Amino acid sequence: MKNKKIKIVIIGLVSILILGAFSTTGIYNGVKDAIYANNKNKSELAVGSEDFETKKFNGGAYLIIDKPLDSAVYLEKDLIVVHVVDQNGDNVKDAYVEILEYDYIHDTTGWGGNAYLTAPSVTEDTDVRIHAETFEGEECIEDIKITIRAKKLYVSAPSSTSEGETFKVTVKSQDGKAVIGAKVTFDDTTEYTDIYGMVTFSAPFVIEDTNYNIIASAPLRWYEDGEKEIKVIDKGVVICGYVVGDDGANGWVPLNNAKISLNNEHKATTNKNGYYIFEVPPSSLQIVPTTSSLEGYFCTIIASHDGYEIDSWSGSIYGTMYINFALK
């Protein structure tokens, strides 16, 4: 058997779209030229700072492999292009290339010496080895070690917000880049991220502090869903409105100093424009029973002013509500 040295070069992370737009011939010719340039002295084989290791196999066949940097990281589902050449820099056809930990991921080099592997799906960073051998039984002295990284969405949002307030959510990939067009769901509302990976939501009104999940997804791009919990804080209720009175010939006019009572506990008076406001914390309100078809806090509001009949309103309230009175 003729002595042969085989080298495997990982061309790198190449997307299918890029391969479709550019010929790989120039890429591999460049690699081949680099091999020739570094192998003028056949007794010392090196590429850059990476020295080749050799070992004798099968009665005189020397196999050589150059390892990528320790930081060689590929995302799951990415295309890994492996180039196999011999000691002369010539392409090796029919070399069998596989990811050892995922033996169903394999390919055989063609005339160009190229094998194409698809990075497997993983749930966390996973170290794998790429192995190659020829049909003559020659194997690599050392497998190429790379890391497969899960394509996962990461959701950034405040840990809490108050009901009725708006807040921003940012979605990024595992490498910290904004993800455009990711689907983000919060409280049955769905938005899609902009060019900055951001969306905006409004917190719902709640009758007690409530935790919600924010979920981001982009399944067509093989991302694992991202999730973030946010607490919506109950601020109680804000009740406001106007009180007007029937002034006969002058019609309806704003009533100054009208007295407003909420649940016979909270008192307010109107200003010269007839405006009043209550800001009531949840601790002093009674939640409507869950058996009721209503939601929120049960409230009774009474409006009165000297010379006018008393008027009242009862019902469930949450968030901010406007309740006006017209006294006769």
Image (cartoon, rainbow, N blue to C red):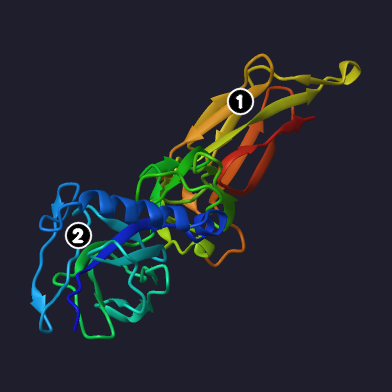
Q: Nearer the viewer, residue 111 or 65?
A: 111
Q: Give the vertical position of 135 relative to 11 (above or below).
A: below
Identify the secondary structure beneath mark 1: strand
The location of residue 3, given as percent across then percent down, is 17, 76
The location of residue 221, given as percent across then percent down, is 50, 61
Image-based side of 96 in relation to 78, left or right: left
Q: Nearer the viewer, residue 162 or 167?
A: 167
- Which amino acid does the dot numbered 1 rest on? Tyr
Identify which residue is drawn at 74% across, 19% down: 254
Q: Nearer the viewer, residue 9 or 212?
A: 9
Identify which residue is drawn at 15% across, 58% down: 42
Image-based side of 142 in relation to 6, left or right: left
- Which of the numbered marks, if any, corresponds to residue 276? 1
Residue 300 visible (yes or no): yes
Query: Where's the C terminus, which quadrant?
Result: top right
Q: Which residue is mark 2?
A: 67
Could you say which quadrant of the image residue 147 lies in? Answer: bottom left
- Which of the numbered marks, if any, corresponds to residue 51? none
Disc on the earlier residue, 2 or 1: 2
The location of residue 195, given as percent across then percent down, is 54, 40
Q: Nearer the viewer, residue 24 or 76?
A: 24
Q: Give the vertical position of 204 relative to 270 (above or below).
A: below
The span from disc 2 to disc 1 (Cα, nearest Å) is: 76 Å
- Which amino acid does the dot numbered 2 rest on? Lys
Could you say which quadrant of the image residue 56 lies in? Answer: bottom left
Identify which residue is drawn at 15% across, 69% down: 142
Q: Give the vertical position of 247 relative to 122 (above or below).
A: above
Query: Where's the N terminus, which quadrant?
Result: bottom left
For disc 1, the neighbor class at 10 Å (few under 14, some 14 to 19, many from 20) is many
Q: Residue furthest right?
A: 249
